[in-house]
Amino acid sequence: MCIDFKRFCRLLPALLLAALPAAALADGSVDSTTILRIEEDNHAGFQSKTLAPLTEFLGLDADQLGDGRLSVHLYGWGRVSLADRYDPVDGGDSSVGGALNYGFLQYRFDHANARARAGRFFISEGIVNEQVDGGSFKTDLPYGFGVSAFGGATVHTVKILGADTDGKGDAIAGGRVNYRKGGLLELGFSGVYETDAPTVSSNNFLPGTFGSHRLIGGDIWLRPFQMVQVSGHTSYNTETKGIAEHSYLVQAFPVSKLTLAASYDEQRDRSFFYSSLLFADMLRNLNQNSKAIGGMATYSLTDNVDVTADYKNYKRDVGRAERFGGEVRGNFLKNTLRTGVDYHYLRASENFAVVPVDGASGSYHAARGYVMHDTKGYFASLDLIGYFFKTRIENRNNAWETVAGLGYHLTPDLSLSGDLSYGQNPQYNDELKGLVRLTYNVKFADKGDKK
Amino acid sequence: MRRSPLISALLLLAAILSLAACAQMKALPNLPATHPEELSSGPVSCSECHEDQQKGTMKPFAAFNHSRIFVKNHRFYAATDDALCATCHKLSFCADCHTNKIEMKPSVKNGDRPDRMMPHRGDYITLHKIEGKLDPASCYRCHGRTNNERCVACHR
């Protein structure tokens, strides 16, 4: 029964494809982006080869089906490699690849923001962030309460090499209940329960570093005054019986053009990373804690120009670091011209260096500037980004990249563009890449907008 | 088996409360499926047009102004008010980054939109060797249990 249900859940997105002809008659939209990349892979120590993957990203939204409350939503991509037979996503010797990112039926009720979904979808509820092949339901309730629930099969990813599994159980369920006091407070309690994690045959993993994915947690939104707002959550791992994460943000709005923010993040590694086979393998010492305290301020100089400054202090058992900097962003000519510059410096001890030896450093400067102009006829962009290392990495003291793009709106719905990028970095002496992009975005509805 | 009068009374009370709650559901407002006016490209400030409290989320519109702080911390908002996000954003907008398998860096797919905040611009292959030690939780949020095909190529 369980296996049949899981098979059904996995087949459902494919079945939704059969509904597309009917969807074509409904309100909705089609988003297609076709990208041909051409790159010369000249990785140090490896034979040079040309890569030419052709990728199609396709999204379909068909609204107001049936009685007007039913809709279908699909998004995925497919790739064919024109010059080689390597699949960079799933690995292996294959010239084709693809994924269904989501595909579900949604029924939207007339009241209480109630909705039901069936198929493959992404769940973001309180401390829960999961992709599921199954069903979900969410609704507001009287007196400020709300409830959501989901269940189905997990969406598996690639197997961790040496473990013959991706580390996920086969079924997952969870949900959230919440209470809202209008304009003042929201409290939420959420949880996720995944069936037992697979037994890992590899001996690469330390005992007690990996297990089933089961979390509960609480979240809060509080605005006691118009000038102050608090958001955040705390999660608890019921398997390790320990706090996994605290993550909180306090914002203040002293005047209309100024926003101040302070953040506090703390992760306890064993509980936070416990259900990730990848991280259990990578982090050899999972008894560390991570703490980060930050501050940020954004001020609108004019209606078109924003200035932001930020600071963050990191503390891990292996060392400390701090990052600070700022950025200026502007929109001009009725938002058709956008530009920005930013600079940050990471001051990090030698323990964070790529190779943590005496005299090494993890510190680096990061600088970026961009400009883009989007008219009814053409659009163009230029993006420059550079990283400047305090101590050399692979015998280089910097990594930089410049990307230039130019495109034309052939019709209001159809655009053709191309990007050319060139850079130098510790990985490549010269990195030259190009792509051609054909974008087709069309709406069949006569009101509203989504982007 | 004889059911106690107390349990019967409680069941009756629960049924009455459920019916009363269901009757009140019709009084609860729905968020619009789409924003009624076409929005310009780029970050928006809801409070430019709305001064009151958003009825569906029961929060002030100003709380959703897309400042840099909002964009950098949008996870808090998406985790509680995804229905409001959906009035202006298609799910594919989110799926550029939040998905099970990513074909290319979002900044490459959207190379014509340098104004959008995208992760891993430039040579992040080198930087991740520093950032991954500094703040592994920031990697975990996207790559811990999904979307880690490229990670496992080296991290075995």
Image (cartoon, rainbow, N blue to C red):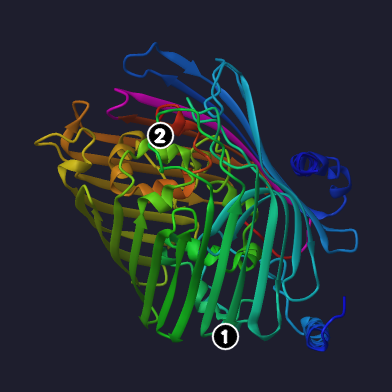
Label 2 is placed on what type of residue?
Answer: Phe
Q: Chain of mark 1?
A: A
**Nearest-to-viewer mark from 2 and 1:** 2
Quarter of the picture holding the C terminus of chain A: bottom right
Measured in 3D between alpha carbons, the distance from the residue under mark 2 to the one under mark 1, in whole angstroms, is 46 Å
Is any atom of residue B51 visible in this view? Answer: yes
Residue A50 numbered tag: none
CA neighbours of label 2 inside 10 A, class few (<14), some (14 to 19), many (20+): some
Residue B129 image position (x, y, % from top left): 30, 37
On the image, numbered disc 1 is attached to which residue? A181
Residue A158 image position (x, y, % from top left): 56, 32
Q: Is residue B70 above or below residue A180?
A: above
Would residue A230 appear left or right of A377 to someone viewing this image? left
Q: Chain of mark 2?
A: A
Would residue A106 appear left or right of A102 to someone viewing this image? right
On the image, numbered disc 2 is attached to which residue? A205
Is residue A437 located in the magenta-colored stretch of the structure?
yes
